[in-house]
Image: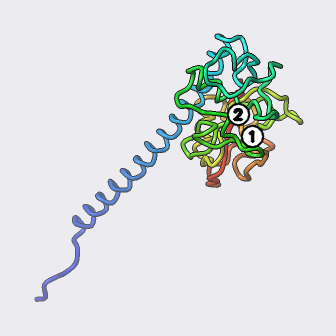
Amino acid sequence: MRKQTGFTLIEIAIVLVIIGLLLGGILKGQELITGAKVRNLISQVDGVKAAFFGFQDRYRAYPGDYSQADRNITGVFASGNGNGRIELTGSPPEFILVWDHLSHAGFITGTYSASNFTAGTSGAAGVTNPANPYNIALQLAYDNDYANTTMPPVARHNVKTGNQIPVEIIAEVDRKVDDGNANTGGFRGSAYNGVTPANCWNEGTGSWLPTNGQPDCGGASLL
């Protein structure tokens, strides 16, 4: 009588259970990593907003636009024009000066200097601007470069997360802090440097498109 070879049903079942546990652990680990990235981005944007309002409360002016910054804040590179808008124009522009003012006034960690600004750029991450978790410079400015159901959108001060953020991350940020719609609420989908990445959200409905896997998205938190 020949000896039977191969796996028994019990052995196969044990292997399948082990594989299931491994896959479950991997998926849970990915979920935890995604959650950490979402919380990090939310915390970063909230910190910038708190700094913005704290500066306004202390100096009765907007950072970057403050016309007396070079007199009242030690180490700043230049003052703004004081017209109540953090503008994209100037030399250096106010949307670069904003980080110079905030950092030298002690409202954000790190030291950012507008003296390092190169004309024609959006700023350098870690030098003129703080960086998002993907090493892209954040922006704080008065503009209408964000998703809206009104065309053209109304210009407002807003904090832009910067781009190169996976769509599933930015969609989850919107869901946690706002209404989950890229076109409405206080957190919107956003272009970066005037370029709107494709496949981040449906421009008609505002629905985020996380299943597209687009790795280059961004958002704007309105002030």
Check disc 2 and report its element: helix, strand or loop.
Answer: helix
Q: Nearer the viewer, residue 165 or 80?
A: 80
In the picture provided, is 162 more to the left or to the right than 134? right
Q: Nearer the viewer, mark 2 or mark 1?
A: 2
Q: Find disc 2 in the rendering and name its residue.
A: 96
Q: Quadrant of the C terminus?
A: top right
Marks 2 and 1 in Cβ contact (< 8 Å): no
Picture coordinates of residue 7, whole percent (x, y): 23, 73
Picture coordinates of residue 96, whole percent (x, y): 70, 34
Q: Find disc 1 in the rendering and name its residue.
A: 206
Query: Which of the 4 quarters of the picture holds residue 207?
Result: top right
Dot 2 crowding, Cα within 10 Å, few <14, some 14–19, many 20+ = many
> What's the CA distance linking mark 2 and mark 1?
30 Å
Q: Amino acid at mark 1?
A: Gly
Q: Residue at x 64, y 53 (%)?
A: 214
Q: How is the image coloured?
A: rainbow
Q: Residue at x 80, y 18 (%)?
A: 82
Asked if 184 appears above or below 216 in the picture, the reply is above
Query: Which of the 4 quarters of the picture holds residue 10?
Result: bottom left
